[in-house]
Image: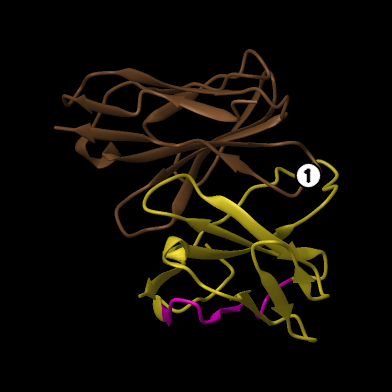
Chain colours: A yellow, B brown
Amino acid sequence: DAKTTQPTSMDCAEGRAANLPCNHSTISGNEYVYWYRQIHSQGPQYIIHGLKNNETNEMASLIITEDRKSSTLILPHATLRDTAVYYCIVRVGGITQGGSEKLVFGKGTKLTVNP
Amino acid sequence: NAGVTQTPKFRILKIGQSMTLQCTQDMNHNYMYWYRQDPGMGLKLIYYSVGAGITDKGEVPNGYNVSRSTTEDFPLRLELAAPSQTSVYFCASILSGADTQYFGPGTRLTVL
């Protein structure tokens, strides 16, 4: 089962920031938080990941609470093309010493960006 | 690089028929995966492979078989198609120790 809890759906106005929350209260010390998104039944696409520090890349920012029990994915200026299902996943990252790098998907958050 | 490619894109099967879903990656990734996604649900892992000749079951393996004879290819076999196998199937790959799992475009399968 997925180790994360996300809201089923969210709406955001175009041009505004989209803040997608995720709870992962049972996260282990060696587990990273990963975010993927799936646009209209295409294959999921990697967005960002982090361990305990906040991370930023060209797509998004990831804010992880100090206790690591929750995180927020931020799309700073949402566009219509950001309408998608966003998945928050926890897994062991980096060198896993024989791990399988498996991803366990929940139902994700359906983000709708409105004009 | 073409990334992860899947064929066919769409397929309709009759109950009891068999077929093979093809998946190929050209990134020299050692880990490969098959997921299925039912409407409104997240992806569920069917089978995975950590290298040529090594495969293992995921969460929902019943009714499927896989093989991994080369690093590049990871076909998924349905022997006796059932309506419950109507789904979208995604193949994915990752290099061990890397951060990003790459997904193919999916195969939409309908069993009637």
Chain bearing mark 1: B
The residue positioned 49% from the left and 21% from the top of the image is: B75
Identify whether B46 is placed above or below A10: above
| Front one among B81 and A108 | A108
* Position of A21 relative to B28 (above/below): below
**Quarter of the image with the C terminus of chain B in it:** top left
**Quadrant of the image for the N terminus of chain B?**
top right
**Residue B5's x, y, as percent?**
51, 27
Please provide percent x and percent y for residue B34.
51, 36
Q: Is residue A64 magenta?
A: no
Quadrant in which residue A24 is drawn: bottom right
Q: Is residue B111 above or below residue A98?
A: above
Question: Can residue A24 be seen?
Answer: no
**Residue at horizontal 44 percent and vertical 43 percent from the top:** B60
Can you name the residue that lies furthest to the top here?
Answer: B69
| Three-letter residue code for mark 1 | Ala
For label 1, the residue is B98
Task: Give the residues in magenta.
Answer: A12-27
Residue appearing at x 80%, y 86% in the figure: A66
